[in-house]
Amino acid sequence: MVEFYIVSKCPMEGLYKNEKLARQVSVSYKDAVVKRFEAPDEIPAAQKYCADNLITVHQNLWQSIADRAKAQEAAERAATELLPAPATEEAETAKEEAVVVTRVVEEKKPSNLPVVRKNTVPAKPYNNPQMQLPQWASTVIFTDGSVMPKPDGDDKERMVGGYAALLVFRSMNETEVMISGHKDYPRESAYMEMVAIYKALKRLKKYRTDGKIALFSDCMEVVNAFNSKLTGWHECGYKLKNGGRVKYWKLWKKIWKVSHKLPLRVQWVKGHAKNRWNNRCDMTAKAEAKLRVG
């Protein structure tokens, strides 16, 4: 039997082949549930459990679990067929004597081979769940924006901004698509972060994607505004109580237009950390801005 685990009721929900990893990604969430299954008999039950809890698991994962179970059964069957016939009492006694003699000879015989010492340094524990793509999402997006000063001919500083968005399609063997560009006279880096989000969601329409979408940004201001304020802004026509308009309301309106029908979840990710996807977006956005700086 091959064990596998389903994590539910948390952002890292999905199928995990390793119990240690499943416990590790769920320990930070109080309501998370880790359920154990055995392949191949309990695969249908696990699939029903995922469907009931709206957990997206790609078909390739189910197939890999089934293949592992078949391979283990075949190995156990082959080992059973190759087992030697039961030995008699005399044969067992002779075997024990031969083993004793062999050990004595080996202990007295010096070895000319160099001593090979095993590495005693313990392996570094995996304690960075942010490096794992969320199992519940079929498409994962990372975005970032950057702003740099650019002197013009009159020695006055003006700004140039770069943006980058990385689309990872887990349903297509984690195919990656990078989008990047620049804008002159941006207001601030948060504005360029919004541009990256808009460009990514607009490009997403060109691909046939099924399932949930996860978008990660390291700009807390933009993430909070998207999750808690954007819908209310749209209903109020992007107007504030004082009669003014929401900051960058035209761009927010574009973002709402391309996102409100998508099964999208926007989350914050720590910037300049060990998340390789976020770091790639950060470097690309900075490069787009730096290329325009004289």
Image (cartoon, rainbow, N blue to C red):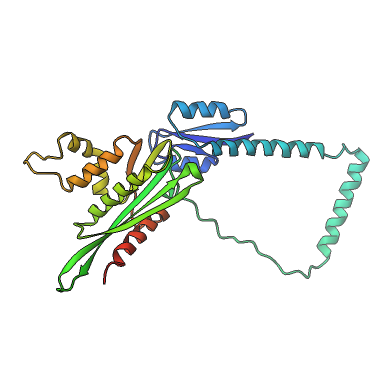
Residue 278, given in percent of the width and then of the height, sits at 37, 54
Judge from the rendering whether residue 160 lies leftward or rightward of residue 35; answer left or right. left
In the rendered image, the residue lying farthest to the front is 206
Task: Please identify the quadrant where the N terminus is shown.
Answer: top right
Q: Quadrant of residue 29?
A: top left
Q: Residue at x 47, y 43 (%)?
A: 170
Judge from the rendering whether residue 155 lies leftward or rightward of residue 34; answer left or right. left
Q: Quadrant of residue 26?
A: top left
- Whether residue 219 is visible to the viewer of this picture, yes or no, is no
Q: Residue at x 17, y 68 (%)?
A: 157
Asked whether 19 or 285 is in front, the reply is 285
In the rendered image, the residue lying farthest to the left is 242
Residue 54, given in percent of the width and then of the height, sits at 43, 30
Residue 192, given in percent of the width and then of the height, sits at 26, 54
Judge from the rendering whether residue 194 lies leftward or rightward of residue 23; answer left or right. left
- Whether residue 142 is visible to the viewer of this picture, yes or no, is yes
